[in-house]
Each structure stands twice: as C-alpha cells, then as structure tokens.
Amino acid sequence: MDLNSLLSWVSISLATISLVVFVSFFVLVRRLYRRIRRSRRLTGAVLRSRTILSRGPQHEVLKLQLRLKESLDSGQAAVDLARSSQGPLGELPRLFRRIQGESITLQSQLRLLTSEADPVVLAEALSVAGRRVDQVAGLVRRLRSAVAAGLGELTDDTLTALRSEVDREVAALRAGVDELRSLNGRSLNGCSLDGHSHNGNDGFSDPRRPLPMNTFNRRTES
C-alpha cells in the first residue's frame, strides 16, 4: 500500500468517526430537548419565571398561560392517581384527553398573543382568552372532584372518630408512663415494688446507718 492510499484510508476513517460522533451528539441533544419539553415541572418553572419577570400586557398573557398549564397538570395528576389506585375510571381518561385537545388550540392562541403589538386587539383577545381559560379550569375541577369521589369516602365524622381514638391512645400511654415513674420513685425511696419497706422498720438495720454509741459500749463491757 503506497502512501497516498494510506492517507486516503486514514482520511476516510477520520471522516467516518467524525460523522458518527456528530450524529450521536445530535441524537442525544434532540432526545434531551424532547425530554425537557415533556417535563411538566421544568416547563412550569420556566413559565413561572417568565411570568414573574414580565411586565404590562405580556404579563397578563403569561399569567393565563401559567394558569392553563397548572390546570392541565393538576388534571393529569388526578387521572394518573386514579389509574394507580385501581379505582373506577369510567370515561375520565377520554374526557381529559378531549380537554387537553381543546387546550392545545388555546395554548397556541396565547403564544400568539405574546407577540401582539396592538393594545386594543390585545385587550379584546385577553378578555376572550381569559374566559376560555376559566372554562378549562372549571372542567378540570369537576374532573378532579370525580376522581376524589372514586378514591373513597372521607367525611368530617370519620376524621373526628379517628381523632378520638388517637386521643384515647395518647391518654393511655401517658397514664402508663406516669405509673412507671411513680413505681421507680418509690423504689428509690427504699420501697420494693410490693410496697414493703426495707429501711430498718422490719427488724433489719440499714447497713448504711451508723450504730448508736451505747450499743458499742455495751459490747465492750461484756
């Protein structure tokens, strides 16, 4: 193999490697971008930051976008919870998909309003868009209520009864602790657990108490 052939082969190899690396990098970046776009938490944080930093009519448009997104996210979370709890779903997933489908057009209209320069047109469009966002939010609230009803009944009476049981258990535990402290205190004062004293009153002298002097003198004289 001559030098020119060798150089050609090396060039082709380097070009192939470069192409593979470039394509792999492009695919990785594209996949990461799609994942970021699908991340509800990240997109919500970005939209919330833009809303805080904006001013004027653009601020109102971004507020509507944020409210619409938060409503849809809460609806999706409710449907996901209903599925994971294995409760009755009915037509809730299909209805929520319809809500999402109608909201796509509304989201596009709100994005278009961010570039509107005519204040009169913007004010009229904001009024209409605001009513539509309110309608979507109301539909999501009703859907979440249906999901909550399917999860099981939880009333104030149930919580009150549960609180009473907890209070009784806490009172019983405190009584047990107080009784244990009382028994420990009597043991430290020279009383056994059966209530009999061992401090010298039963005929046995306390080894810690010194003998009287007259007793010592009697023993010496004897």
Image (cartoon, helix red, strand yellow):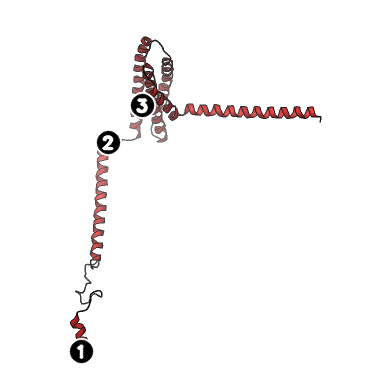
Q: Quadrant of the C terminus?
A: bottom left
Q: Which residue is mark 2?
A: 155
From the image, tell me which residue sits under label 3: 143
> Which residue of the protein is positioned furthest toward the right in this rendering?
2
Q: Quadrant of residue 44?
A: top left
Instruction: Point out which mark residue 221 bears.
Output: 1
Q: Position of residue 52 (x, y in %)?
A: 38, 24
Residue at horizontal 37%, vertical 11%?
A: 119
- Residue at mark 1 to residue at mark 2: CA–CA distance: 89 Å
Q: Earlier in the sequence, mark 1 or mark 3?
A: 3
Asked if residue 197 lies left or right of residue 91, the reply is left
Quarter location, residue 184: bottom left
Q: Earlier in the sequence, mark 1 or mark 2?
A: 2
Viewer-proximal residue among 140 and 175: 175
Q: Residue at x 77, y 30 (%)?
A: 6
Q: Nearer the viewer, residue 6 or 25?
A: 6
Question: What crowding class fits label 2: few (fewer than 14 Cα within 10 Å), some (14-19), or many (20 or more)?
Answer: few
Is 41 or 153 nearer to us in this picture?
Answer: 41
Whether residue 90 is visible: no
| SS label for mark 3 | helix
Residue 10 in sight from this viewpoint = yes
Amino acid carrying label 2: it is: Thr
Q: Residue at x 36, y 30 (%)?
A: 147
